Image (spheres, rainbow, N blue to C red):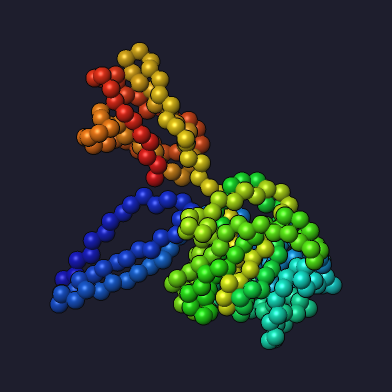
């Protein structure tokens, strides 16, 4: 008889997870299965790696994927607005791929290899029968500019990347601060992507953008802006995603009302909050004051009775 025990835990939104399932059979043999999954919202802002700028800094906001079924004015697929507008070398991109580009999709942009993508196909493609593509054989030092109208917010940035030559680092993203549409663009480094577990052209990973200390970078974007992605090794690039940064309260507000202490804190949907207390900062243990509170974007209040001469509080966010 094989016994499988299940456990459950609250999952945070916009997070990449690895689940390890271990089973012991009747002969005492241990079998392990590792599964990767994520809770990234389908509403997060994304842009496709193959949909870089054209015609010296021109772009399409929220382009419709139509390859290879039809042409449209708001698609990068040949025809419509894009049919006679090629990307300009050293302005919109700087790639020197010398192989054959994918016929029919940006095939007048010499130097960039677009190919059918082997990654999980998202609903934006399956809903209209189009094909997901990626930028393939993206060699070290080659860059692509992406201009979009970004929703104003603070973000973490993730790349959906595959390392053809194994582990990679120093794949960067920069903000174009001036000169978009010219050969004299100035840039500001935002962060870099590194994947120590990259395992081939068809093995796709979520790779977060980090700073030189390995910390997730928080970038502020809003309105029409241009970012530049530069390869640090031979990669395939599917798309990039902006994940809104969770607003963490800087303090827990406390006030006395009659014989009670009221503890107030702002919340955000998708997170759980718990107020903990301790009667001493030099000993004892932190205990939950109440059941976890579900965030919904409003200010919540947890109440404690006034007891003893002192009590300390802190807020835990999950």
Residue closest to the far top: 258
Q: Could you tell me residue 158's position as x and y percent?
A: 54, 60
The residue closer to the viewer here, 191 or 15, is 191
From the viewer's perspective, tell me whether residue 127 is left or right of residue 203: right
Q: Is residue 238 visible?
A: yes
Q: Quadrant of residue 235?
A: bottom right
Residue in the image at 25% along x and 34% along y: 282
Query: Where's the C terminus, which quadrant?
Result: top left
The residue closer to the viewer here, 71 or 142, is 142
Say above or below: 265 vs 149. Answer: above
Q: Could you tell me residue 55's position as x and y percent?
A: 82, 67
Q: Could you tell me residue 40's position as x and y percent?
A: 50, 56
Query: Where's the N terminus, which quadrant?
Result: bottom left
From the viewer's perspective, tell me whether residue 306 is left or right of residue 139: left
Say above or below: 215 vs 136. Answer: above
Counting labels gives 0
Residue in the image at 47% along x and 35% along y: 250
Residue closest to the far right: 84
Residue in the image at 32% along x and 71% along y: 33
Q: Is residue 128 visible?
A: no
Residue in the image at 70% along x and 80% along y: 96
Residue closest to the far bottom: 99
Q: Could you tell me residue 264's position as x and y percent?
A: 43, 27
Q: Quadrant of residue 279?
A: top left
């Amino acid at each position: 008889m094989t016994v499988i025990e299940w456990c459950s835990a609250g999952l945070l939104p916009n997070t990449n997870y690895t689940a390890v399932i271990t089973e012991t059979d009747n002969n005492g043999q241990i079998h392990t299965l590792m599964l990767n999954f994520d809770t990234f919202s389908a509403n997060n802002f994304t842009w496709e790696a193959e949909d870089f700028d054209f015609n010296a800094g021109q772009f399409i906001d929220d382009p419709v994927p139509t390859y290879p079924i039809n042409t449209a004015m708001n698609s990068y697929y040949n025809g419509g607005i894009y049919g006679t507008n090629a990307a300009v070398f050293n302005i919109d991109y700087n790639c020197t791929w010398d192989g054959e580009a994918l016929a029919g999709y940006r095939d007048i942009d010499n130097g960039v290899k677009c190919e059918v993508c082997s990654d999980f196909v998202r609903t934006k493609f399956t809903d209209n029968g189009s094909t997901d593509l990626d930028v393939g054989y993206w060699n070290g030092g080659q860059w692509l500019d992406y201009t979009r109208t970004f929703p104003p917010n603070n973000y973490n940035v993730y790349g959906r990347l595959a390392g053809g030559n194994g582990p990679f680092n120093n794949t960067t993203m920069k903000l174009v601060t001036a000169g978009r549409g010219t050969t004299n663009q100035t840039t500001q480094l935002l962060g870099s992507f590194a994947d120590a577990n990259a395992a081939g052209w068809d093995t796709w990973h979520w790779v977060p953008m980090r700073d030189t200390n390995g910390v997730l970078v928080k970038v502020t974007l809003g309105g029409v802006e241009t970012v530049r992605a530069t390869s640090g090794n031979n990669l395939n690039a599917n798309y990039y995603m902006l994940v809104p940064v969770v607003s963490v309260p800087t303090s827990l507000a406390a006030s006395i009302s009659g014989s009670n202490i009221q503890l107030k804190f702002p919340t955000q949907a998708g997170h759980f909050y718990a107020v903990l207390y301790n009667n001493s900062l030099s000993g004892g243990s932190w205990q939950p004051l109440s059941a976890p509170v579900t965030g919904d974007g409003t200010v919540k209040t947890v109440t404690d009775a006034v007891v003893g001469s002192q009590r300390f509080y802190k807020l835990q966010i999950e």
